[in-house]
Image: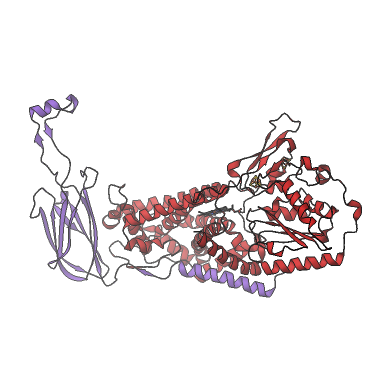
Amino acid sequence: MLEPRLIFGQIIAYGIFAIVLGYFSNSPAYTYHDPEKALLMVSFSHASQTKEECRRFTQEELAELAPNMRRPMDCPRERVPVYLEITMDDEVVVSNSYSPTGLAKDGSTSIYESIPVKPGKHELVSRMRDSRRKEGFDYTSKITVDLEPRELFVIDFRKELGGFYYK
Amino acid sequence: MSAIKAVLRKGFETIEDLFDRIFGAKNNPFYQLGALGWFYFWIVVVSGIYVYIFFDTGVTQAYKSLEYLTHEQWYAGGVMRSLHRYASDALVVMMMVHMLREFAMDRFRSSRWFAWFTGVPMLWLVFAAGISGYWMIWDQLAQYIAITTAEFLDALPVFGESIARNFVTDAKLSGRFFTLMVFVHIALPLILLFIMWIHIQRHASPKVNPPRTLALGTFAMLLVVSFVKPALSQPPADLNYVPATVNLDWFYMPIYPVLNNVSGVTVWIALVAATVFLMMMPWLPPGKRHPVAVVNLDNCNGCGRCAADCPFSAITMEPRSDGSAYQLEAVVHADHCTSCGICVGSCPTATPFRTKSDLSPGIELPEHQISELRDKTIAASGKMTGNDRIIIYGCDNSLDATDVIDDKTQVLTMPCVGMLPPSFIDYVLSRNLFDGVFLTGCRQGDCNYRLGLKWTDARLAGERDPRLRKRVNADRVSKYWAGLTRHKEFFRKLTAFRKRLAAMGPEQDSGQQGKKTGVADINA
Ligand code: HEM
Ligand code: SF4
Ligand code: SF4
């Protein structure tokens, strides 16, 4: 039979382990986002225009191509970067140029940004350039939002739906 | 690195000394970490199966089914759920301490690279399994984990489409991910079990079950936590809101705050680098491997004791290759051998009673030949006087006893005290080389070569071959498993032994002295 002193020691040892397990299994709490703020999230994937226009091969160029590679048009597949600018109440919150995916930069561009913002009423303007033009925007969209604290407001983009849309 | 190791080792030994006093060597949890890991794993499996029976695997119903278990069926389902959580947490603790300890005790080199190397993927599996489990609750914590994990995976350039997008824009897709997680949460533990099994393949009689008292105590402890602080869900996931504050399980999720503050690519590089470094550790720095055991077929009779006693399954018995009349021969698999010499201690032919010319046993460590041990013993005896002359046979991994050497005391060490054939004790006493034999080695319950002490104890007690012959006067043999730290007790035991010897006077039974004893005698 164990001495009482040892039983006591074991209870302490088990007790410490029990407390460690019980406590650290869900404490201390971790705050990764200011609970007073809402979150703007830009998340979409979009294929921008190709960097160069397709053009017809010249006769000489066609002659140089292997016969099985001959085709009338030369279409370089590299795409232009997507430029995105978002302002909230005229303050710029995103202004960034994003590269297309893929080694040859021929894939679509993925954009994933999250921006904590003050809750309340705001005017959001989203602008995007996805073409060869150097200035101006191909898409512009305006929306007035009324955000609650912790609310997640998603800015998405679907070309087939006509551009920016919100959730 | 060796400085860190030394400090860690000292730390472990100090705590373990305390635990030895509280739990006893047999139930000391630090000597049973691997076994406790298995035990926790089985608790997780059984409780997991129970919870799964009531778990609804749809993304919207999952949360409700767990709420039902926790609140309506708190006495069974709730307890099972809590056991599932706390045993998983305990598994992480055990695994990290186990890893740290094998490192501190330098038990990851030589043939042990195998256990170390296979341990590393288990780190990933345990963490991934635990995290996928929290995902399945689909509460705010799960939502946080899902998004943060997805962002982390997106940092790898392998997934074309962003995974994290699924969780912000498309509830349907996050549902599909959820189903994937349920699958992952069942598959990963199965893979883990398989690697746990591989992990111990090189260990003869691995410790996969903790002693009963320790198992009962541990289980009772988990039950108490489960009742006092039942595992609960956080509020249900709602993709329209940011959870903002989450109650992390810090055993499984210490990496998540890092992910929120450091770029995913950096974390990937750090994790992969750490994993590769861990996997290479057994060979950093390289070299330092001692020559492995060698079989001398001329003296091997194929009895198989060495194969039975090798703690690292490094010996197999194979059909005879030298045309001798014996059926089997011992074969050492060099890459499994740790050069501990325990096989030498088990070999019936390793007896010092044999004539000098053929003291070449069936199996031998090239760096520690048994004939050399006999010669050293005889040479040491020459310088001794009195009737309390003691020879201490110790091991290279426990305390350095050389400072007790004087005109009555000699010390000879070997890699493991399990290397000492019991016939040596008989030899020393019957030839009156010394008046007493004192054995020391690693601390009780934690032999550096796993089974050296266990076999030595059993051989001395006459419970395992080769047995210490009955004619040996037990009063002239003493042992204390001192480890590195227990100097005081070691000296106390040694002094007491010396007093006993002095009181006994010289050995009376001189009839046996000088009697030639053959192998057959030792076998008997
Ligand atoms: C789920 C996690 C793990 C379990 C259940 C587990 C279990 C075990 C068991 C039962 C043993 C045999 C102990 C014996 O019989 O002497 C062992 C040995 C060992 N384990 Fe683990 N282990 C785990 C993780 C790890 C990890 C992460 C590492 C290190 C990276 C590791 C390194 C080792 C080493 C080096 C040994 C050999 C010790 C020796 O030879 O004395 N293990 N483990
Ligand atoms: S213990 Fe010795 S005799 Fe027996 S099989 Fe091993 S080497 Fe041969
Ligand atoms: S020295 Fe002998 S007992 Fe030790 S690992 Fe090698 S073969 Fe096994």
> Closer to the camera, B170 or A6?
A6
User: What residue appears at the point 66 percent right and 75 percent down from the top-left corner?
Assistant: A5
Quadrant housing residue B268: bottom left
Counting from the top left corner in percent of width and height, residue B41 is at: 54, 56
Q: Is residue A110 above or below residue A23?
A: above
User: What residue appears at the point 59 percent right and 46 percent down from the top-left corner?
Assistant: B202
Q: Is residue B519 above or below residue B30?
A: above
Counting from the top left corner in percent of width and height, residue B199 is at: 55, 49
Counting from the top left corner in percent of width and height, residue B348 is at: 76, 44
Horizontal side, residue B21 vs residue A15: left or right: right
> Closer to the camera, B22 or B236?
B22
What color is chain A drawn in? purple
Q: Is residue B398 visible?
A: yes
Q: Residue furthest right?
A: B511
> Closer to the camera, B308 or B12?
B12
> Closer to the camera, B98 or B235?
B98
Horizontal side, residue B520 vs residue B161: left or right: right
Which colour scheme appears in the figure? by chain
What color is chain B drawn in? red
Q: Is residue B199 visible?
A: no
Q: Is residue A51 above or below residue B399?
A: above
Image mark count: 0
Q: Residue furthest front?
A: B383
User: What residue appears at the point 59 percent right and 68 percent down from the top-left corner?
Assistant: B14
Q: Quadrant of the C terminus of chain B?
A: top right
User: What residue appears at the point 32 percent right and 61 percent down from the top-left corner?
Assistant: B262
Counting from the top left corner in percent of width and height, residue B280 is at: 47, 49
